Image (cartoon, rainbow, N blue to C red):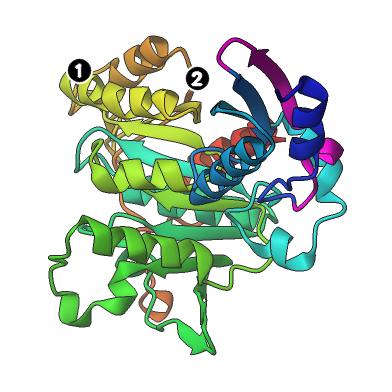
Amino acid sequence: MINEQTVREILGQLKDPFLHKTLAETSGISEVSIKEEKNHVSVKLAIAKINTAEQMALQMKVVEQLKAAGADSVGIRFEELPKEVLEQFRGTATESEVQDILSPLSKVEFISIASGKGGVGKSTVSVNLAVALARLGKKVGLIDADIYGFSVPDMMGVTELPVIRGDRIIPVERFGVKVISMGFFVEDNAPVVWRGPMLGKALDQFFRDVEWGDLDYLFLDLPPGTGDVALDIHQMIPMSKEIVVTTPHPTAAFVAARAGAMALQTDHTLLGVIENMSWFEAKTTGEREFVFGQGGGVKLAQELRTDLLGQIPLGQPDWNEEDFAPSVYAEDHPIGQIYTDIAKNIIKKTN
């Protein structure tokens, strides 16, 4: 008959698959209970990241070793280690562990930009927020994760392609932002007709095979809606703050609520709502025309119990033929200043 002390000794020697420390060192053995009449062992273990292939491998090892020690059956539940515990091990992490942006030890702040439907300016918001944070001195990366509707390279006026060095992809840098997109790997703007598993592999490469270097923020321009690609990304990344983009129109806000709900259901945090195309301001009179109605962003923020980060009017950046980037607002442009204010707010919320 196996006893609790034996169980704890066995489990204590197993290693957290991400921290590479024993469960005894991480205090990862949360609960142990034994039903003597059935010789059944139940354990609850805390590890750095759950719902992964690494967790499954650890689970199999736990069952194998406890049965070898005399248990007839084993039940296991997993939970994530508290943030304060992870912080204790960041200082002892190897360089490769810190550079792996999907590692729980990585200090990269993921910010996902989501929308309930297409056409609300989600990619424009992604690009300009990333550029605004870079102007504020932050180290920023941007993944164009809208696999079917990639547009970030064109919006930013990117004309170069990523460089391959060995087995690593070096992202293109523009306006101080490191950029990677499916658009770099598709010839002549061809449509992407891949199936789900192939898309998942591409996204995994964007995270694991790109040489991102030292980043403060990594923006993810998600596909619109709550489909497979968006769900895959939510499951891949350890933790993400999410911004939901909508227009003022009530229907757009209603649909966008689904994207916000998805973030909450996948244990990500809502950073706030951005209302895009809030109004059109006439240059001659300064009068505002509410082309798409009013109130959608405010209503959505209230429904999701989060903040309205900003309202962005309809407008066009000032184009420069020498440094062409059709969707990037200059720092001194009135709309560029709005993005700067939102970026400052994001810094406050994530520090």
Q: Is residue 134 above or below residue 211?
A: above
Is residue 310 something one can see in this rendering?
yes
- For the record, the magenta segment spans 20-38
Q: In the rendered view, does 243 fall on the left or right side of 222? A: right
Q: Residues within 10 Å of mark 1 (few under 14, many from 20)?
A: some
- Compared to residue 190, the image places residue 308 above or below, namely above
Identify the residue at image location x=25%, y=32%.
Answer: 116
* Residue that label 2 marks: 307
Whether residue 24 appears in magenta in the rendering, the answer is yes
Q: Position of residue 325 (x, y in %)?
A: 37, 68
Residue 257 image-quadrant placement: top left
Q: Is residue 331 at least partly visible in the picture?
A: no
Residue under the image location 43 percent in, 54 percent down: 127
Residue 153 in the image: x percent, y percent?
35, 69
| Type of amino acid at the residue the image marks with label 2 | Asp
Q: Is residue 219 left or right of residue 277?
A: right
Crowd around label 2: few <14 · some 14–19 · many ≥20 (10 Å): some
Q: Is residue 94 left or right of residue 119?
A: right
- Mark 1 lies on a secondary structure that is helix
Residue 62 in picture, x, y percent from top left:
62, 40
Give whichever of 6, 96 is nearer the camera: 6
Disc on the earlier residue, 1 or 2: 1
The one nearer the camera, 334 or 73, is: 73
Count of marks, rendered view = 2
In front of the other: 280 or 18: 18
Residue at label 1?
250
